[in-house]
Image: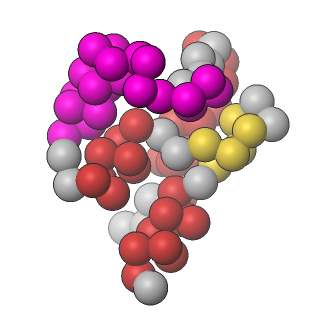
Amino acid sequence: MEIFKNIEQSIICIQNQNVIIDSDVARLYGVDTKRINEAVKNNPEKFPKGYIIGISEQEWKLLKSKFSTSIKT
């Protein structure tokens, strides 16, 4: 199924964990990224432990650089 292919392509490894970033979760659910972040902030008890991870500025820069080099024009 196409949706499973999209999910699989959205999984990245950060801090030795397979994760999907908030914007990809939002795309899967068909909502704005800010709505995903609001749901997490307003209802933390609804999300399992380890669902949300924090990343360092260095990890964020590395992640952004990977996305910018993978964009096909």
Q: Identify which residue, 71 or 18, lies in the foreground.
A: 18
Query: What x and y, as percent, mark residue 51?
Result: 56, 31
Which residue extends farthest bottom? 1
Residue 2: which quarter of the image? bottom left
Query: What x and y, as percent, mark residue 60?
Result: 57, 25
Which residues are drawn in magenta? Answer: 32-51
Residue 7 higher or lower than 41, as above or below: below
Residue at 22% across / 28% down in the picture? 34
Query: What x and y, as percent, mark residue 13?
Result: 71, 44
Residue at 19% across / 46% down in the picture? 31
Q: Is residue 59 left or right of residue 15?
A: left
Q: Inspect the magenta stretch and tell me whether residue 26 lies in it.
A: no
Residue 37: which quarter of the image? top left
Q: Identify which residue, 36 or 72, lies in the foreground.
A: 36
Residue 30: which quarter of the image? bottom left
Residue 46 higher or lower than 20, as above or below: above
Quadrant where the C terminus is found in the figure: bottom left
Residue at 28% across / 14% down in the picture? 42
Q: Is residue 64 left or right of residue 59?
A: left
Chief secondary structure of the magenta portion? helix
Q: Coloured how?
A: secondary structure
Looking at the image, can residue 60 be seen? no
Q: Inspect the magenta stretch and tell me whether residue 44 lies in it.
A: yes
Residue at 21% across / 31% down in the picture? 35
